[in-house]
Amino acid sequence: MGRAHGDAEPAEVVAGVRLTSPGRVLYAEQGVTKLDLARYYESVSDRMLPLLSRRPLSLVRCPQGRRTACFYQKHADETFPKAVRRIRIAEKAGPVKEYAYVTSLAGVVALVNLGTLELHTWGVHVDRLERPDRLVFDLDPGPGVAWDAVCEAALHLRDRLEELGLRCFAKTTGGKGLHVVVPLLRRAAWRQTAGFARAFAKAIEAEDPDRFTTEVAKARRHDRILIDYLRNTRGATAVEAYSTRARPHAPVATPVRWDEVGPGLRPDGYTVSNFGERLRALGGEDPWAGYREARQALPATALRALGVS
């Protein structure tokens, strides 16, 4: 039964955060509300927070829902509540700007309350901003590329990275492609990690230019897969694992095991509405088991082989 005219919407509290307009529909296709989204993040917080916590954030916000005006927010502002922390960072061009980061589920829910539908993170933590702790290779298929070919490409990158002595992990993006993620020890500076990412992507492209490209221009990659290595530069971001996307049906960027990467997987197949089924199917299993323990240095032999100093 609907509320009488003028009645206030009942308050809902998740992780100690009082949601305003908890019944506001953020994803019309499935009727996913702000409360539903907060409850989703509550359900995955044990898995998500170790990956998300203490990383500078950029956000995609859609305060009135996905179908209305959405905007990308890079810097923190006065609307952010106390549960969302801030850090001042000097940018490349020189100015110092405030960025947001979170350390708890309360911080994530506070961002949901602001209409945040996507959480994108830097490849560093706030305590060591000049020492990256991951590499992300974003495999973005051109419109003429079949999904099976994207899965095969991810497996190919995995094999090549393993040949260099690097363990890596896979996740769907909630969009069109896959991410191949390499956890790192916090030893190398941005120049070296970005140089490695570029050299590795260029080497893969050179070996099979009919299959891969590093050209961002869409006109040049109709039937090829873009290896986007630019997410490994200072200030660049990648959608964080378990983040929703501001796309139809509330898809989720989802960590997967390598044996799941194949025809049965879809880049936007896991959503807020069906993620409970995913968790039940996994039981207590973590698809990224061993991620923290896999943190590794860039091998000196690989750096020399790729011409990275």
Image (cartoon, rainbow, N blue to C red):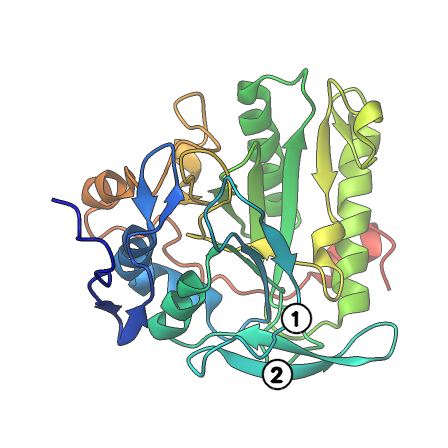
* Residue 270 marker: none
Left or right of 142 in this view: 116: left
The answer to whether residue 143 of the structure is visible from this angle is: yes
Q: Which residue is mark 1?
A: 75
Residues 6 and 76: in front is: 6
Residue at the far left: name it. 1
Q: Is 277 located above or below residue 212 in the figure?
A: below
Disc 2 to disc 1, C-alpha distance? 10 Å
Image location (x, y in percent) of residue 20: 34, 65
Residue at the far front: name it. 5
Residues 250 and 172: in front is: 250
- Amino acid type, residue under disc 2 in the picture: Ile
- The residue depicted at 65 percent of the width and 18 percent of the height is 145
Question: Around disc 2, counting alpha carbons within 10 Å, would you say few (fewer than 14), some (14 to 19), or many (20 or more)?
Answer: some
Residues 246 and 135: in front is: 246
Marks 2 and 1: which is nearer the front? 1
* Residue 87 marker: 2
Image location (x, y in percent) of residue 17: 30, 74
Left or right of 147 in this view: 114: left
Left or right of 15 in this view: 170: right
How many discs appear?
A: 2
The answer to whether residue 166 of the structure is visible from this angle is: no
What element does badge 2 sit on? strand
Which corner quadrant holds the C terminus? bottom right
